[in-house]
């Protein structure tokens, strides 16, 4: 970046005008710091963003996906993974400190970060206390790319273990489309009935795709 005028270098630009003044590639370039022969760091950053469809896609990938990117050595991959984990923990902290009803968008963002990059379909549950604050996120079941077996008895058992007052159900669609199926709707009602027997409310069922999340509650299906 030394070839750039001082006021156009990402670090100097950020310090002078704030982070909002930087383009996506410039922000990522600050983290990567260097490129490789024939490819500057800003160009490398843009390559990474293009490959993973922007920050949303980058935040949702698994560690193995970074290994195939030229210019990302172990140190850079570790830094990217650390930033992703900090984002997840920051959202988790906010959900622990406030009722999830206060910020449904944060719930969807948090679940997208946790489930969006999975290559296998998984079913997870946000266990909430009586004030609907986050107690724990647990991935309870995993399956193939097209089917997951979910056992209501195990969901009830874990809810009792956490002394939960409510839950948010979630699963991912590795195909990328977040549109819920009829099977998703049926599963929601099955779990809602089972959990009601132990006085635990189902607040929502969130389906996570790639770059998209759908709330069944927002569609009146919970």
Image (cartoon, rainbow, N blue to C red):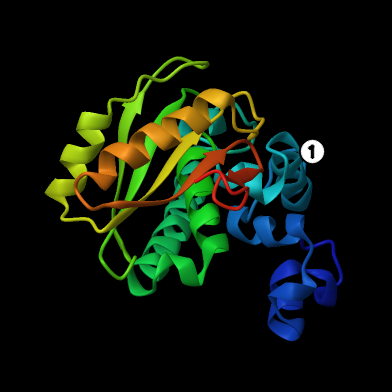
Residue 166 in which image quadrant: bottom left
Q: Is residue 101 visible?
A: yes
Describe residue 133's horizontal placement relative to residue 14 as left or right. left
- The image shows residue 7 at horizontal and vertical percentages of 83, 77
Q: Nearer the viewer, residue 52 or 123?
A: 123
Q: Nearer the viewer, residue 15 or 21?
A: 21
Q: Quadrant of the N terminus?
A: bottom right
Vertical order, 88 against 37 (above or below): below
Q: What residue sits 48% from the left and 48% below the top?
A: 111
- The image shows residue 147 at horizontal and vertical percentages of 47, 16
Vertical order, 129 against 211 (above or below): below
- The image shows residue 82 at horizontal and vertical percentages of 43, 52
**Residue occupied by mark 1:** 38
Q: What residue sits 62% from the left and 56% below the top?
A: 33
Quick one: which residue is furthest to the bottom in this view?
16
Describe residue 85's horizontal placement relative to residue 36 as left or right. left
Residue 208 in which image quadrant: top right
Q: Nearer the viewer, residue 161 or 44?
A: 161
Alpha-carbon neighbours of circle 1 within 10 Å: few (<14), some, or many (≥20)? few
Describe residue 210's horizontal placement relative to residue 217 as left or right. right
Q: Is residue 118 visible?
A: no
């Amino acid at each position: 970046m030394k070839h750039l005028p001082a006021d156009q270098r990402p670090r100097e630009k950020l310090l002078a005008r704030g982070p909002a003044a930087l383009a996506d590639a410039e922000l990522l370039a600050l983290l990567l710091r260097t490129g490789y022969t024939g490819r500057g760091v800003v160009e490398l950053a843009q390559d990474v963003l293009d490959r993973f469809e922007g920050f949303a896609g980058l935040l949702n990938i698994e560690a193995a996906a970074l290994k195939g990117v030229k210019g990302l050595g172990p140190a850079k991959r570790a830094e990217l993974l650390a930033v992703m984990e900090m984002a997840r923990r920051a959202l988790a902290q906010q959900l622990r400190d406030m009722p999830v009803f206060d910020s449904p968008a944060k719930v969807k963002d948090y679940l997208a970060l946790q489930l969006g990059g999975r290559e296998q379909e998984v079913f997870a549950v946000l266990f909430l206390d009586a004030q609907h604050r986050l107690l724990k996120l647990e991935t309870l079941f995993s399956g193939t790319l097209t089917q997951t077996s979910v056992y209501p008895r195990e969901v009830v058992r874990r809810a009792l273990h956490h002394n939960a007052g409510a839950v948010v159900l979630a699963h991912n669609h590795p195909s990328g489309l977040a549109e819920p199926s009829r099977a998703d709707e049926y599963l929601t009602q099955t779990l809602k009935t089972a959990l009601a027997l132990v006085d635990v409310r189902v607040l929502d069922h969130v389906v996570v795709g790639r770059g998209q999340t759908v709330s069944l509650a927002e569609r009146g299906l919970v």
